[in-house]
Amino acid sequence: MTAEALVSETKAPVINPNPNLRFLEEVSSRTAGVSRLEMCIQCGTCGGSCPSAADMDHTPRMLFAMIRAGFREEALRSNTPWICVSCYHCVVRCPQEVHITDVMYTLKSMAIAEKLYKETTAPDFSQTFVDMVENYGRSYEFGLATRHYLKHYPLRLPSMAPMGLGLLTKKRMEITPRRIERIEQLKAILARAKELELLS
Amino acid sequence: MSRYLFYPGCSMESSAIAYHESLMAILGPLDLNLEEIEDWNCCGATEYLGINLIPAYALISRNLALAAGQINGHNNNTVVASCSACYLNLAKADHYMKERPVLGEKVNLALAAGGLKYQPGALEIRHLLDVIINDIGLETVQTKVVKPLKGLRVAPYLGCMVPRPDYNKHWSDHEHPNELDRLLKALGAEVIDFPLKTHCCGGHMPQISPSTAFELIRRLIQAADEYHADVMVTVCPMCQMNLDAYQGETNRHFHTNYHMPVLFFTQLMGLAFGLEPRKLGFGKELVDARKAMSRIGVEVPQDEMQPRKARRKKEGLPMPSMPGEEAE
């Protein structure tokens, strides 16, 4: 390489010489607020603070290293975001103030969009919950519980019967859904929001 | 007297009806006035955020827009939420729309489709407990106590989403806040310094990964039991649901036999204010609280579901039982 070529190469604007870095940027840009994901120093405080880390494929620290290294598919297939319980223990302890819980939400939404989740129980639950909310404007526990448990946990039903019966007889679960008055307004807002989501 | 805007959230009408009933009962003694946001919708809990970003924030923000539209000369710009997840979601939407204006712009474009708009920062989002402690004050609460809860050993349990992430610094600590302890002490209860007071109840895990949920529930119930708590006291519908309704399944999962009643702090406030247990949602809990409450001479009504006598014979096959049923 000639000296001139070397100079011209170093002068060229360097934007992402490593294409894998784009995954980090993508995750960051899809996260609400400022994710600060690039600030992670791999200290492991997150995994050490996590009450459900034992059931995760990767601790949050490992997952963030994978995102940084551009392991797109592996990261989106990890069960970690689905096992995250949104307790925010890691968030308040993170010395770099990474918005860890919100990054987990982003990874879930990306895994759903690309159908990369390994297990359908969690995405199905979220989707069923959201379907009810989009139709009624309120959550509808009885519909959600029956639909979800019949599909995913038929064998748990006998063990859960006393609880379900208890909730019903104590009037802690309503059999019919409640609908908000201006459901059409909410539907219009959500339809517009979905268009905006696709544009971004 | 302060008049606040009020966002109850879906659980308050169903699984946490005891929270709602007891809250309504103590408004009078506390001289607290709550004005419900008209036609509010679900906040999306922890589910919508994991599916779609803009729709999730638009869903939350419809409530903020409606609330802001309800501000007038008689109330202030504070929205009080009683449910932890609702409180966090409302605060989160307001906070992130400020932190990242482009999110606020997109959410407002979506809201415009319904003729609404919201200026981030227009409202202050606070949890009910915060308002009781910091606005009404413990001195006022104490003056209303006519029947101190003397002799009742309580484990204060806040769960996660009230003290964390705490965008607006309302709480004394992220992991060991003392607000609930101080309130329960003011009611005359014997308060345990409960180290797991902000640990996770499992959230939506009973529906997604039951073994994960049962382990988290067990940790809390076992700790409260080891500290000889008579009852656990919570501020969150989800925590109450997981610890109370899933306690039976957790016991079966681990072959344990814990029996830990889980009540809302508003129910205990009502009791201390001398109100009728029937008006405070007592009897709605699935883990029987009668024995615990009888320690302080409170009779819990159980007329809604009479425990049936087991029809099966003693020599029959072992069957699942709810906590509190006699082991045979």
Image (spheres, grey):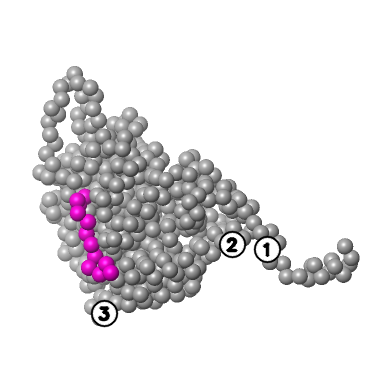
**Considering the image in quadrants, where does the C terminus of chain B appear?**
top left
Q: What is the number of the mark on residue A25?
A: 2
CA–CA distance in space, label 1 to label 2: 10 Å
Which residue in the protein does label 1 denote? A16
B130 relative to A56, above or below: below
Q: Circle 1 marks a residue in which chain?
A: A
* Boundaries of the magenta span: A173-184
**What residue is shown at x 16% (from left), y 59% (from top)?**
B25
Please, which residue is most extreme toward the bottom here?
B73
Circles 3 and 2 on the same chain? no
For residue B143: magenta?
Answer: no
- Taking the spot 52% from the left edge, 46% from the top edge, the residue there is A78
Chain where mark 3 sits = B
Which tag is nearer the camera, tag 3 or tag 1? 1
Image position of B59 (left or right of A3): left
Residue B207 or residue B223, whichever sits in front: B207
**What type is the residue that disc 1 sits on?**
Asn
Q: Dot 1 lies on which element?
A: loop
Above or below: residue B25 compared with residue B67: above
Report how far apart the C-alphas of labels 3 and 1 lie in the structure. Answer: 52 Å
Instruction: Report the amino acid beneath label 3.
Output: Asn
The answer to whether residue A63 of the structure is visible from this angle is no
Q: Secondary structure at mark 3?
A: loop
Q: Which residue is mark 3?
A: B72
In the orientation shown, which residue stands out farthest toward the left? B303
Q: Is residue A130 above or below residue A161?
A: below
The one nearer the camera, B223 or B144, is B223
